[in-house]
Image (spheres, rainbow, N blue to C red):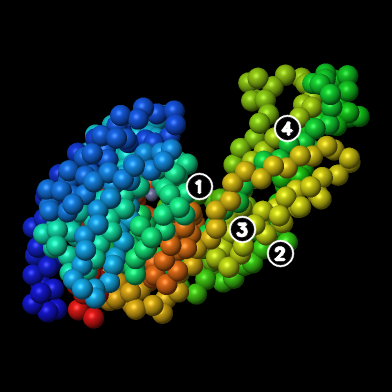
Amino acid sequence: MTRSQFDMRAKVASLMPAVVAELKEMIAIPSVAFPAFPPEPVRAMADRAVAAFQRYGVPARLQEIPGGYPTVWAEIPGPAGSPTVLLYGHYDVQPAPKEQGWTTEPFVATERDGRIFGRGAADDKSGIAIHLATLAAFDGKPPVGIKLVLEGEEETVSHLEAFVADRPELFHADVMVVADMGNLTVGEPVLSTDLRGHVKAIIELSTLQDPIHSGLFGGAAPDALMALIKLLAQLTDDSGTCVIPGISSAEWQGAEYSEEMLRANAGVLDGVDLIGTGGIAGRLWSKPSISVLGLDCPSVDEGGNVLQPRARAVVAMRIPPGQDENDAMDALIAFLRDRVVGGVHVEVTPNKKSPAFHQGTDGAAFAAMTTALAESYGRDVGRVGSGGSIPLLDELRKASPDADFVLIGAEDAALARIHGPNESVDPGEIEHMALAQVLFISSLAAE
Ligand SMILES: [Zn+2]
């Protein structure tokens, strides 16, 4: 380690108490940007983030986004000839209903077992903390150009995507750092190279004019719910593998994900087989998967002795990088229509699609972050994928087609439980990621 790397490690460490205190204050603000939730906390959170960055000399301000919540924005010009690095995170959070099974108040930061619990502790207020610690370590004057972009609507309908499409020049950068990911395990650094895309369709089957008595007509008159169940059962083979034809699929080439880790992280019950074939990493990151996410039909308590005339389901497919999302949607819709038998009336409506994302590993910035992570953690860096999609990345890539995307963060897969109850973050991950980002920026400046 060089002298300046040593100094930077000490500097980031000295900043951590204040950064963690700030993170706890941010967790206390329920910045849920879903339409049904109050707007005041979302705006309060944006203001809080602006003030936090200003305290360290970063000229942060609000950037209004048409139709949506503002983005926290800062632009710091770098020395002549230095590259521009865009730092992305988001300040909105998922809702946190108590019924999810929270054992602490979701909007009160609570320390336990070396972790900080609370909604947004990891996703993605930890990303804000990483960027805050990074820019604070440079006293607000980093040796490269910086664009800080903290979105207010990542978890809901994003208006930032259209704004980026409208004003791509504002988002032009040489490198994009997306701090909304995490290591598989605390203390073991990884870089995400692939994100699966997502296509969803709603299918409705109809067989009868009205609900009818199951005793008088059962056995001759078809019920729509049974027809729907038979159709949905055809989406996978006996191993649970998606059988929609024409969807690309490959084995994963990077780090492996152990079956034991998957079972623990997903909470698979004892004795229940996993689905799919081949390595776990491939099943999660480089092969398609298909799921039924919801059904409209009578509940068990409300279902009478009645045959259902109509039934509806939402079917969602995750698609690997390299698979076009429009082709995937067409294939899904065609499959659902073609497999309905017996003349049952079928209507399929496309619901949502987001593209998959792939980052090549041969770019200079990707290599620089690999080195910085290895230095910060003192360990080799694995390459992983992610099942979740971030549609905004596609717009950012259009704004800067040549930029390397570096996907990092403190949302570890093992314990962070993002979107679920008892979300938490390990502050050590924030510190390691911030130091890596500081070393990364320093190395870009030195080139
Ligand atoms: Zn997130």
| Figure quadrant of the C terminus | bottom left
Q: Residues within 10 Å of mark 4 (few under 14, many from 20)?
A: many
- Determine whether, in the image, residue 27 is placed left or right of residue 339: left
Task: Tell me the residue that label 1 is attached to.
Answer: 269
Could you tell me how far apart the alpha carbons at marks 1 and 4 are, in whole angstroms? 30 Å
Identify residue type, mark 2.
Answer: Gly
- Report how far apart the C-alphas of labels 3 and 4 lie in the structure: 26 Å
**What residue lies at 79% left-to-right and 21% top-to-bottom?**
211
Residue 364 at x, y percent in the picture = 34, 78
Q: Which mark is residue 246?
A: 2
Q: Nearer the viewer, mark 1 or mark 4?
A: 4
At label 3, the amino acid type is: Glu
Can residue 91 be seen from the camera position used here? yes
Q: Secondary structure at mark 3?
A: helix
Residue beneath label 3, please?
325
Q: Between residues 186 and 128, which one lies in front from this camera angle?
A: 128
Q: Which of pointers 1 and 3 lies earlier in the amino acid sequence? A: 1
**Relative to 170, is 312 above or below?**
above
For marks 2 and 3, give the CA distance.
12 Å
Closer to viewer: mark 2 or mark 4: 2
The answer to whether mark 3 and mark 4 are in CB contact below 8 A is no
Q: Are marks 2 and 1 in contact (CB under 8 Å)?
A: no
**Mark 2: few, some, or many residues within 10 Å (few <14, many ≥20)?**
few
Report the residue at 21% width, 63% height from top: 77
In the rendered image, residue 32, in percent from the top left (x then y), is placed at 37, 35
On the image, which quarter does residue 331 sit in? bottom right
Q: Nearer the viewer, residue 46 or 234?
A: 46
Residue 76, above or below 312: below
Mark 2, secondary structure of its residue: loop
Give the class, few, some or many, for how many residues have Cα within 10 Å of label 3's Cα (few <14, many ≥20). many
Q: Label 4: which residue?
A: 311
